Amino acid sequence: MTSENQIHTALYLAFQRTQWAELRESVPLTLNEPELADLRGINEKLSLTEVTDIYLPLSRLLNLIVGARQQRGLVLNEFLGRQPPKRPYIISIAGSVAVGKSTTARILQALLSQWAEHPRVDLVTTDGFLFPLAELKQKGLLQRKGFPESYDMKMLVEFISNIKAGNPHVKAPLYSHVIYDRITDNYQPIEQPDILIIEGLNVLQTSQDTIAGIQQPFVSDFVDFSIYVDAQEPLLKSWYIDRFLQFRGGAFSDENSYFHHYSKLDDAQATMTAANIWDTINGPNLKLNIEPTRDRAHLILQKGDDHLMNQVLLRK
């Protein structure tokens, strides 16, 4: 298996890459190379072949699932004689830092929006729900950024519950990776999309906390279909270091960047710094909080070398 924390394979149907690719059937490829280039993440070698073999079958599966849900809703509404508010189908995408969650989310958004049954697909990342930088510092959580306690869960749950309730105008906070902080004067409007994709480290977690004996809701309680992007930790660490080195000559070189000081590191220093960040923050967060949620996913995308998918696990 892909990690020390073994997947409960009895829960899933396993598809090797070629088997999964056959499930695409006649779904057309609607992306071209320039469009794909805009969707790729840093240090990823995503090709149109990868989109064809992995993401088109997944797009077809999700379209069938969403269509069945829509049809069930129509039947139920006819039976009850009412017209409820439009409620988006919610898909969550979880996984480690550097695994490529954001790219997976962007690819799915692009592909799913091509289906006539659900043309409006919005994408929200949970980064905007991190506590503001000043508050993280005040609470002593700066070195725990990305851990569950660094997120404003009350704000996140309120946001997704409003989406699920069909509220026509909901605002998602935005995040800047340049200033390493939530943007306070701008929001992403969410206005009853057909599908909402929410991507983040902790979207598969459940809350065990109770108040007066009542268990509190969590993001996963509102999600209709969940995806976990998986890879072995040595690969993840290597990808994180490679990404850090690319950021050093790119985003970090911006004088406004919170990490501008890293741009002055040489290769050896940058590699050592990135490895230390992984070993003290991202690696422990993966083992303690992210990877243990993997078996809750409806579908697991397993990556091997070069970010290429080698197996897909679909929950029975």
Image (spheres, rainbow, N blue to C red):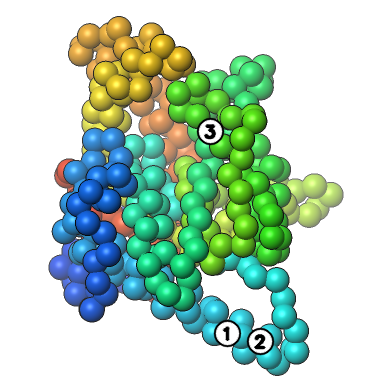
Which residue is at a point 39% across and 41% down the rendered structure image?
A: 96
Residue type pointed to by label 1 = Arg
Residue type pointed to by label 3 = Tyr
Could you tell me how far apart the alpha carbons at marks 2 and 3 are, in whole angstroms? 39 Å
Which residue is at a point 65% across and 46% down the rendered structure image?
A: 171
230 vs 245: above or below: below
Q: Secondary structure at mark 2?
A: helix
Q: Is residue 22 left or right of residue 167?
A: left
- Who is closer to the viewer here, 294 or 262? 262
Where on the picture, by quarter, is residue 264? Answer: top left
Does the residue at mark 1 contact the one at mark 2 (Cβ under 8 Å)? yes
Q: Is residue 167 left or right of residue 19?
A: right
Circle nearer the viewer, 3 or 1: 3
Q: Is residue 70 left or right of residue 177?
A: right
Badge 2: residue crowd in 10 Å (few <14, some 14–19, many ≥20): few
Relative image position of residue 108 (x, y in whole percent): 37, 58
Q: Label 2: which residue?
A: 76
| Residue 221, visible in the rendered structure | no
Lower sequence index among marks 2 and 3: 2
Residue type pointed to by label 2 = Leu
Relative image position of residue 199 (x, y in whole percent): 47, 48
- Who is closer to the viewer here, 235 or 111? 111
Number of the label disc, if any, that sits on residue 175:
3
Q: Is residue 146 left or right of residue 42?
A: right
Q: Residue furthest right?
A: 212
| Residue 304, visible in the rendered structure | yes
Q: Secondary structure at mark 1?
A: helix
Which residue is at a point 52% across and 37% down the rendered structure image?
A: 127
Q: Label 1: which residue?
A: 72
Could you tell me how far apart the alpha carbons at marks 1 and 2 are, in whole angstroms? 6 Å
- Who is closer to the viewer here, 280 or 312? 312
Where on the picture, by quarter, is residue 9? Answer: bottom left
